[in-house]
Image (cartoon, rainbow, N blue to C red):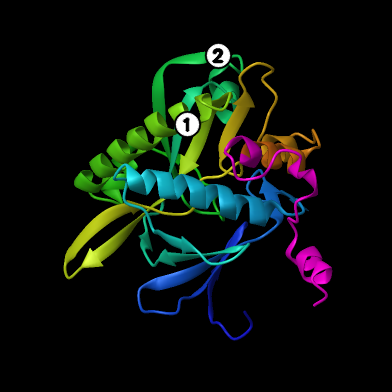
């Protein structure tokens, strides 16, 4: 990994130059952040789980025709992805009141929303990802109207699919964050899904108990973060039953193999 040229490092992932033009290697870290990185920590093995969960979801989305940057998983912590020009707009899809929406509007957390709500934020760590509207996006040229139509349509398609996927394993999809990017064919840009979909960027509640199976366990000091992420992976069929002892940490994996 030291020989590769690092392109970008974010809060949860590192991007390296890929083996072919137009590709990148996406490395999933164990670092955990919350409240725009005001709170920092580590969830041991999170990167391995998120890599596997995101691979699974993006593969399924690709099978229903949702264009994504995902090409294939390379190893426990890395994926090969298409290089995209990231649209600097974070897309929040909300089905149930929770988090900042509950605080802003005074709606009790857990309230089913009358309809799915899509909100946008300007992707800027320095500014704390402030909320924006379609008017801001158009005025500052962050995306064209046609691109925003594509983004909204894809967000709803992804939401419909994920709601069904998670409901089938007893999980309520409360809300989640998406990022999109452009890939270029000469002068024509096409919008595709980028980043990741994992418990890091989704609120996932057990349907029977409302137990949180996502990064809110870290945000709210609930503990049991690794077990929650493992439970999501297990229900998706990515960890065997009784897989609590599955190797999730790359360093442990190397030591166990005698390297």
Front residue of 243 and 11: 243
Discs 2/1, front: 1
> Which span is picked out in magenta?
233-259
Residue sitting nearer the eye, 78 or 105: 78
- Measuring from the top left, give residue 68's x and y in whole percent: 36, 53
Mark drawn on residue 111: 2
Q: Is residue 239 magenta?
A: yes
Q: Secondary structure at mark 2?
A: loop
Above or below for 204 versus 210? below
Identify the image quadrant of the N terminus: bottom right
Q: Is residue 181 above or below residue 80?
A: above
Q: Earlier in the sequence, mark 2 or mark 1?
A: 2
**Residue drawn where x is 32% and y is 42% of the image:** 64
Residue 188 appears at what percent x and percent y?
17, 62
Is 39 left, or right, of 107 in this rendering?
A: right
Q: Residue furthest front?
A: 241
The reply to whether residue 141 is visible in this rendering is: no
Left or right, 64 with respect to 248, comes to left
| Badge 1: residue crowd in 10 Å (few <14, some 14–19, many ≥20) | some
- The image quadrant where one finds the C terminus is bottom right
Q: Quadrant of residue 5?
A: bottom right
Query: Residues under labels 2 and 1: Cα distance?
Result: 21 Å
Q: Residue at x 50, y 70 (%)?
A: 25
The structure residue drawn at horizontal position 66% and vertical position 45%, both measured from the top left corner, is 239
Relative depth, front residue between 152 and 28: 28
> Circle 1 is placed at which residue position?
165
* Element type where label 1 sits in the image: helix
Q: Is residue 251 magenta?
A: yes
Sort mark 2 into few (<14), some (14-19) or many (20+) by Cα contacts within 10 Å: few
């Amino acid at each position: 990994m030291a020989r590769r040229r690092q392109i970008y490092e974010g809060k949860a992932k590192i991007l390296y130059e890929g083996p072919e033009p137009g590709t990148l290697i996406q490395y999933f870290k164990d670092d955990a952040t919350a409240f725009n990185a005001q709170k920092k920590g580590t969830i041991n093995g999170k990167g391995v789980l998120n890599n596997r969960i995101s691979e699974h979801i993006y593969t399924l989305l690709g099978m229903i025709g949702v264009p994504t940057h995902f090409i294939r998983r390379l190893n426990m912590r890395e994926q090969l992805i298409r290089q995209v020009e990231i649209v600097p707009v974070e897309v929040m899809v909300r089905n149930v009141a929770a988090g900042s929406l509950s605080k802003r509007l005074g709606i009790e957390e857990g309230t089913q929303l009358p309809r799915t709500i899509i909100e946008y934020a300007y992707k800027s760590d320095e500014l704390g990802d402030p909320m924006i509207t379609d008017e801001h996006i158009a005025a500052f040229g962050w995306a064209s109207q046609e691109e925003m139509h594509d983004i909204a349509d894809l967000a709803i398609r992804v939401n419909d699919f994920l709601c069904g996927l998670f409901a089938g394993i007893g999980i309520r999809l409360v809300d989640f964050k998406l990022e999109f990017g452009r890939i270029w064919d000469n002068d024509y840009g096409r919008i595709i899904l980028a980043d990741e979909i994992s418990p890091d960027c989704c609120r996932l509640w057990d349907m029977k108990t409302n137990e949180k199976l996502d990064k809110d366990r870290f945000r709210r000091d609930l503990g049991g973060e690794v077990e929650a992420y493992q439970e999501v992976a297990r229900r998706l069929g990515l960890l065997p039953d009784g897989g609590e002892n599955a190797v999730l940490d790359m360093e442990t994996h190397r030591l166990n193999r005698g390297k």
